[in-house]
Amino acid sequence: MAEFRIYLRLEPRDHEQDLQAGFESAVYDPVWFLARQWQMGEFQGENASTPVWANYDLRSRPLLAADSRFDPTEIPAEAIVESEIDDWWTMGRRVRLGREAAAGNNLPDEDNLRFHNPPPPYEHFHGQYDGLALWRAGLMPADLVADLPADAVPAWSNRQLLYQQDESTAFRTEDGTRLVVQRHHGGRMDWQAVDALVGNDAADPQTDSREAVPTALRYPGAPNSRWWQIENAQVDRGSYVPDSAHTATAILTELIFSHSDDWFLFPVTAKSGHVVTMETLCITDGFGRFYDSEKLVDDNERMWPGLQPPEDWALFRTSPLLDGDKGLSAEALVLWHVAEFPLESGPIERVQFGLDEESNLLWAVERVVDGRETASRKTDEPDENEHPKFRTDKPDPEISTMREYVYIPGQGAALFWHPYELQEEEAGGRPRRLEQRRLLDFTREKPWPLPEPQAKVLQAEGEGPHFIIPLAVPSNGIEVERRWQLARDMKGRPVLWIQRRRRPLYAPPARRLRFDVMAEAVEK
């Protein structure tokens, strides 16, 4: 039996050859569109014109770093401020240079010159020569470290547990202006991270005269100037959070809800690693009229007296370093290369700090040391024959026998927990501080000192034990991490450094130390 299938399809058929109707963009309800245009403020008449040309003079001052091998015009600012001593010595360089130095050279057979339980994945190199240890001991051949760069002056303060620049690490300009990074917690560092101490302005900075074409400001959901288009319905203007602390967000929110479409922008080209200042500005409109920056200030003061912004007001302003100084001018802006989304390693170190009011101590707890969790880290245990515990047996379960008790000096000491004791201010000496101490295991017949801290964050900067100022650690505690960071400079070359980052904790770490403990004794 034959089967026939028939398909029917409707196709448009144009009976008119005139395309004028399609170009007319006719609508069935033009009154609705007119009402919508009125609602968007497109019928508001203003005594204004459209800017078509911008002329401005830009003054540029290059930044200079304290270390000559760091160029702020090329290297990210984070790498300059956060770089620390010996961060050139990666594990790969330490292994490679250690092998090359051992080949053909009679090196002393000492344990402090070799790797001791290196972090993964370098366990295979346990017992081999460490290039960094050989270099510190002066045993590294000079030809192997010919390209070794000079060490940077570290800006990290182990006393305050944050980055704090001083005169030796501050940025400078040719006219003597100093830009100092204050209380940087690690991470992204933009222009607002610095304070300024203005110099004598004796140098003659470079000034360029430039031109630009203004264009209308566009943002998601902006009203379209064409009469037959409206805003995108998928844009949620309510997602712009009105935050008074961010002036730019407040201005954008005001712009959106005022339905203004007469804002214009023009690009200002400037080099990275410079302090730029716009000296003059002249705008030319579509009628050929000129609007000079100084003339606009005078006209606005005449038309709206008493409604002008404060003197030297600016949206972006670098604060002064010292009281009484004005800092950079209102027209000046610090531009430098910021490391956008750098590649970072796992934590090399993670140390937590917290105040323990019950023990009246500050605890520094090593969670990660040398890239490994301290719970899985191998530690040197005491000799049980030389340091036996007070009691290792269990008490007699018979309740009718006479009970005897022995005195145990202390309990609760644990590995990787390091106490800091409050020391009051000394006359003519150090200020009030939290000074590092060392715990002893008193649960043994012969007290055994617990290992000293290994984290770089807990090492003293000079002579004596490491100490922290009391205001450096809040009541909820903080956590300090060290990680490798990899980014690229302005020329695309890789830049590697170790970053320390400070974060708050929800609750401080605490450990209960018990003293004068009486434990039940049993005859052996």
Image (cartoon, rainbow, N blue to C red):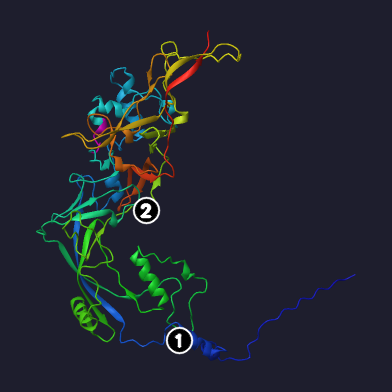
Nearer to us in this view, 342 or 172: 172
Residue 474 lies left or right of residue 152; in this view the side is right
- Residue 216: image quadrant is bottom left
- Residue 321: image quadrant is bottom left
Residue 273 in sight here: yes
The residue under label 2 is which amino acid type?
Glu
Residue 124 lies left or right of residue 314; in this view the side is right
Residue 293 lies left or right of residue 523; in this view the side is left
Most extreme residue toward the top is: 524
Residue drawn at 42 percent across, 28 percent down: 513
- Vertical placement of 61 versus 473: above or below? below
The x, y position of residue 49, in whole percent, is: 30, 84
Mark 1 neighbour class, 10 Å CA radius: few under 14, some 14 to 19, many 20 or more:
few
State the residue position of label 1. Answer: 38
The residue under label 1 is which amino acid type?
Trp
Residue drawn at 42 percent across, 44 percent down: 505
The x, y position of residue 479, in whole percent, is: 39, 41
Mark 2 neighbour class, 10 Å CA radius: few under 14, some 14 to 19, many 20 or more:
few
* Magenta stretch in the rendered image: 144-149
Between the residue at mark 1 and the residue at mark 2, the CA separation in whole angstroms equals 43 Å
The x, y position of residue 85, in whole percent, is: 27, 37
Numbered label attached to residue 410? none
- Vertical placement of 191 versus 430: above or below? below
The x, y position of residue 351, in whole percent, is: 38, 37
Q: Nearer the viewer, mark 1 or mark 2?
A: 1
* Labels in figure, total: 2
Numbered label attached to residue 340? 2
Marks 1 and 2 in Cβ contact (< 8 Å): no
Residue drawn at 24 percent across, 68 percent down: 313
Most extreme residue toward the right is: 1
Residue 498 in sight here: no
